[in-house]
């Protein structure tokens, strides 16, 4: 073997080792060791899908981390279904918050034979993808999608572990009317299923309570310049402004509103209720009141303990709905145990009878697949810090 051949072989070997290292980049040392120890176990895939690129990628990765932590813990503790050892494998995919990409990934999950899917993050992706899962008898449990339409389509496979905008919109509307004494209201949405859906529910509740909508505007979830819309709104002199959108648009919107001398409070939902919105809005974030379709992590029954484990594993704080993605995995495993099967259709059939106590609290589904009980938490920002404002609890069947 000549020197050139030796160098080529060494180069290929090093490249192979590098690729092997990259393939395990999302595995902790514990999960890697567990994988080796469970080589004889039946591998059962759970799909997770959310935006891992684009303006909401930080939120999507947070959800994926929550699901991954659950999978790692379950594998570490050992899982036996129908007398067989089972090792879970999380297939994490990026839908880029795009409906077309989301439906393609949904079909990929069907082809791969996943037992269930945790996702999608965005309502505008969950809604079209849900038909594909339903046709294949695969459960979809969204930890984040709040548009009521997602579970109103009548699909037996659609579930969620957060509140809907039918609860979130009225909570924001009630706060605007009662606490801010708003009479005139401007409403803006980002033209997505989430943003428009939340804005519609808010407007309906505000009008029912006596508020008057003096401006209704739409933008996109990719917009960064809102001066034209804000100029129109300013001429209507609203007491408050509601913006249905994500933090990537709500942050710049608030900053530009203040710059134009528009000092009305801005209300928004869970997509904007993050720490990142402070970075994007600057000091103007103190003008924001937002809601989350859940309890604060600090008020969840097992929130503090989960937060410690999450931060230790991922070297950073919870950003969004990681506890919900985490619990969604455990709900799937609970259904597997009750069905005594890893077949997707049998797991789906067991899900409606879910009666599970998780990090977020008690999880049980109504006839549509929505949570029977839960809470909406309102926040405002003080000196740029997200601060709890109020909690509105709900119960019974979805509206």
Image (cartoon, helix red, strand yellow):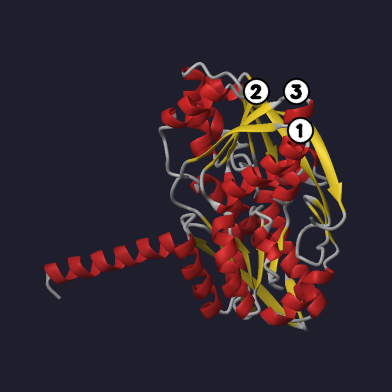
In depth, the one of 357 and 382 nearer the eye is 382
Residue 156 sits in which quadrant? bottom right
**How crowded is the residue under tag 2: few (<14 C-alpha within 10 Å), some, or many (20+)?**
some
Which of discs 1 and 3 lies nearer the camera? The answer is 1
Asked if residue 61 lies left or right of residue 355, the reply is left
Image position of 121 with respect to 270: above or below: below
* Tag 2 and tag 3, C-beta contact below 8 Å: yes
Asked if residue 292 lies left or right of residue 300, the reply is left
Residue that appears at 50% across and 62% down: 93
Work out whether residue 43 can be spotted.
no
Residue that appears at 41% across and 60% down: 22
**Residue hosting label 3:** 181
Q: Secondary structure at mark 2?
A: loop
The CA distance from mark 1 to mark 3 is 11 Å
In depth, the one of 201 and 30 nearer the eye is 201
**Residue hosting label 1:** 210
**How crowded is the residue under tag 3: few (<14 C-alpha within 10 Å), some, or many (20+)?**
few
Work out whether residue 128 can be spotted.
yes
Image position of 356 with respect to 244: above or below: below
Q: Position of residue 176 (x, y in %)?
A: 72, 29
Q: Secondary structure at mark 3?
A: loop
**Residue hosting label 2:** 239
């Amino acid at each position: 073997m000549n020197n050139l051949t030796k160098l080529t072989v060494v180069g290929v070997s090093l490249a192979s080792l590098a690729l092997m290292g990259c393939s395990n980049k999302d595995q902790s040392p514990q999960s890697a060791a567990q994988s080796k120890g469970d080589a004889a176990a039946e591998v059962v895939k759970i799909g997770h899908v959310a935006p891992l690129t684009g303006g909401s990628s930080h939120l999507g990765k947070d959800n994926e981390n929550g699901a991954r932590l659950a999978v790692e813990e379950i594998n570490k503790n050992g899982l036996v279904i129908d007398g067989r050892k089972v090792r879970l494998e999380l297939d994490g995919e990026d839908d880029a918050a795009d409906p077309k990409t989301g439906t393609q990934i949904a079909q990929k999950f069907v082809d791969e034979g996943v037992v269930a899917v945790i996702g999608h993050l965005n309502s505008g992706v969950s809604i079209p993808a849900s038909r594909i899962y339903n046709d294949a008898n695969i459960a979809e449990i969204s930890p984040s999608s709040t548009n009521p339409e997602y579970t109103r389509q009548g699909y037996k496979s659609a579930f969620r572990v957060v509140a809907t905008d039918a609860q979130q919109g009225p909570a924001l509307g009630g706060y605007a009317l009662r606490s801010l004494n708003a009479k005139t209201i401007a409403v803006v949405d980002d033209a997505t299923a989430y943003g428009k859906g939340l804005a519609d529910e808010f407007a309906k509740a505000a009008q029912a309570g006596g508020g008057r909508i003096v401006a209704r505007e739409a933008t996109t979830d990719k917009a960064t310049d809102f001066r034209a819309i804000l100029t129109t709104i300013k001429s209507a002199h609203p007491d408050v402004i509601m913006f249905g959108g994500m933090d990537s648009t709500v942050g710049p919107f608030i900053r530009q509103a203040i710059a134009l001398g528009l000092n009305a409070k801005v209300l928004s939902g869970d997509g904007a209720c993050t720490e990142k919105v402070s970075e994007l809005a600057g000091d103007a974030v103190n003008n924001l009141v937002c809601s989350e379709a859940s309890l604060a992590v600090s008020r969840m029954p097992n929130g503090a303990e989960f937060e410690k484990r999450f931060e230790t594993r991922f070297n950073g704080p919870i950003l969004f709905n990681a506890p919900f993605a985490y619990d969604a995995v455990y709900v799937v495993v609970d259904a597997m145990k009750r069905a005594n099967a890893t077949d997707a259709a049998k797991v789906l059939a067991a899900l409606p009878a879910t009666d599970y106590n998780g990090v977020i609290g008690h999880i049980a589904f109504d006839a549509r697949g929505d949570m029977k009980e839960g809470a909406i938490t309102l926040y405002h920002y003080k000196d740029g810090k997200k601060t709890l404002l109020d909690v509105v609890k709900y119960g019974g069947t979805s509206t």
